Image: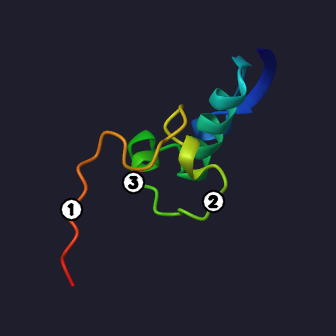
Amino acid sequence: MIKHTIRKDGGKTVTVNLTPIKAIRHQCIECMGFQFREVAECTSQLCPLFPFRMGKAHTPGRGRKQAPEKAA
């Protein structure tokens, strides 16, 4: 964990303790205009940070029900 100064909503700055995953989460929040709820709705799947945007690694298909495959 490292101390680093980050930007907060309204242009203020604050020094926080960051792990790599927390740093990614803060970047995603900033990218979405400091709207926390918008991070979950992010559609930029080509962003290299996309799988980590919720503060943990995302495993595709885990915890989600997948639609059954249609027979050809």
Q: Name the residue: 23% across, 69% down.
A: 69
Q: Tags 3 and 2 in contact by the CB under 8 Å rule?
A: no
Left or right: where 62 falls relative to 13: left
User: Can you say which quadrant of the picture contains the N terminus?
Assistant: top right
- Amino acid carrying mark 3 in the image: Glu
Colour scheme employed for the rendering of this structure: rainbow
**Residue lying at 49% horizontally and 37% vertically, measured from the top left:** 54
Q: Going by the image, does 61 lie left or right of 54? A: left
> Which residue in the structure is indicated by mark 3?
41
Mark 3 Cα shell of 10 Å, populated few (<14), some (14-19), many (≥20): few
Query: Which of 9 and 46 lies nearest the eye of the viewer?
Result: 46
Q: Residue at x 53, y 63 (%)?
A: 44
Which residue is identified by label 1? 67
The secondary element bearing badge 1 is classed as loop
- Mark toward the start of the polypeptide (2 vs 1): 2
Q: How crowded is mark 2: few (under 14 residues within 10 Å), some or many (20 or more)?
A: few
Q: What element carries label 2?
A: loop
- Vertical placement of residue 62 versus 38, above or below: above
Say which label, 3 or 2, has the lower sequence index.
Answer: 3
Sequence-first tag of 3 and 1: 3
Q: Which quarter of the figure is the C terminus placed in? A: bottom left
Calculate the distance from the C-alpha at mark 3 to the C-alpha at mark 2: 13 Å
Q: Look at 65% across and 38% down and name the residue there.
A: 24
Q: Position of residue 56 (x, y in %)?
A: 53, 32
The residue wearing badge 2 is 47
| In the image: residue 35, left or right of residue 50 | left
Where residue 70 appears, as percent x and y from the top left, is 19, 75
* Amino acid, disc 2: Cys
Mark 1 residue type? Ala
- Estimate how packed mark 1 is, as few (under 14), some (14 to 19) or many (20 or more) residues with alpha carbons within 10 Å: few
